[in-house]
Image (spheres, helix red, strand yellow):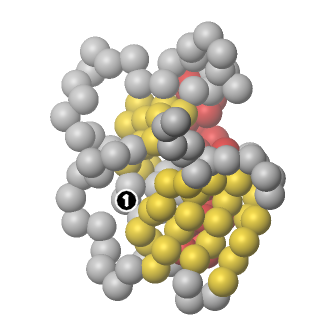
Amino acid sequence: MGSRLYSIVIDSRNPSSLARFWAEVLDFKVVYEEEGSEVVVARDDSTYPGLIFVPVPEPKAVKNRLHIDLNPHDRDVEVERLIGLGAKRVDVGQGPEVTWVVLADPEGNEFCVLRPRDGGV
């Protein structure tokens, strides 16, 4: 029997702030918070995977090796919403011909906003 994906852990300078950004992005809620330790966001208390934000002393230094892809109903509208929440456009060498938009969260973690795909939520 294989393993079940339980959570994705994200290093953060300010876990509380970054967790709330991602909760807003994903329409999740904070389901657990221990000051100075970790903040967990998920759809609800029993839905997985969740995102766990843990404190680290150093800022992000290089391009992510793992990133989140978002599948919105309307890519361009969603990009503008995310920028309004604090994301910014970034260039990781994706070129002008791609169908996705690369953004960074408030701590610089890159993520992609895809063009709508079947099954988008």
Q: Is residue 32 left or right of residue 9?
A: right
Residue bearing mark 1? 108
Q: Is residue 117 visible?
A: yes
Q: Residue at x 52, y 36 (%)?
A: 1
Q: Residue at x 32, y 18 (%)?
A: 98
Seen in the picture, residue 57 relative to 118 is either above or below; the reply is below
Rendering coords of residue 52 (x, y %): 56, 64
Q: Quadrant of residue 103?
A: top left
Q: Residue at x 41, y 24 (%)?
A: 100
Q: Residue at x 61, y 10 (%)?
A: 118
- In the displayed image of the protein, which residue is found farthest to the front? 1
- In the displayed image of the protein, which residue is found farthest to the bottom? 36
Q: Quadrant of residue 5?
A: top right
Rendering coords of residue 26 (x, y %): 67, 45
Q: Closest to the observer: 2 or 118?
A: 2
Seen in the picture, residue 8 relative to 98 is either above or below; the reply is below
